[in-house]
Image (tube, grey):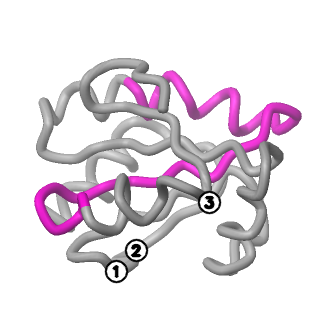
Amino acid sequence: MTKINPFIFNIDLEDFDQQVLQASYRTPVLVDFWADWCSPCIAIAPVLGRVIESFEGQVLLAKLEVDEGHNMKLAGKYLVRGFPTIILFKDGEEQDRFSSARPAQFIEHFIQQQL
């Protein structure tokens, strides 16, 4: 797991349960299902980063590159049909999701609804 900053980290299939589902009992976790060939994924990444930093640890961001290893299995499990798809997990369960690049205000409101 590579740390990008204290609240943003990369995950894969092997650590998804611990780093997302189990961790979401303590702090809500957004999972960014993304791919490096996806232009909207690249566009939303810095926006997500700024928004997550502004919440100062109230929510975490786990980045899952779907084309690495067996990560596509998670995309299938959660019925992800397009990229990026951002899913918020809380208490081990999916709470809400959105797809495609969105502005910071949308993401902030999306998170605030779950806190």
When asked about the image quadrant of residue 104, the answer is top left
Nearer the observer, 18 or 113: 18
Residue 33 in picture, x, y percent from top left: 63, 52
**Type of the residue with mark 3:** Ser
Task: Specify which label sits upstream in the sequence, 1 or 3.
Answer: 1
Residue denoted by label 2: 96
Circles 2, 3 touching at the beta carbon (< 8 Å): no
Residue at left offset 48%, top offset 38%: 103
Residue 61 in picture, x, y percent from top left: 38, 42
Residue denoted by label 1: 93
Question: Outermost residue, right direction?
Answer: 37
Above or below residue 1? Residue 88 is below
**Type of the residue with mark 2:** Asp
What are the residue bounds of the magenta stretch?
23-49
Residue at left offset 34%, top offset 68%: 21
- Residue mark closest to the camera, 1 vs 2: 1
112 vs 96, left or right, is: left
Residue 51 in picture, x, y percent from top left: 31, 32
Above or below residue 29? Residue 17 is below
Density class for disc 2 (Cα within 10 Å; few <14, some 14-19, many ≥20) is some
**Type of the residue with mark 1:** Glu
The reply to whether the magenta stretch includes residue 69 is no
Q: CA distance from mark 1 to mark 3?
A: 18 Å
Residue 62 in picture, x, y percent from top left: 44, 44
38 vs 18, left or right, is: right
Label drawn at residue 99: 3
Q: CA distance from mark 1 to mark 2?
A: 9 Å
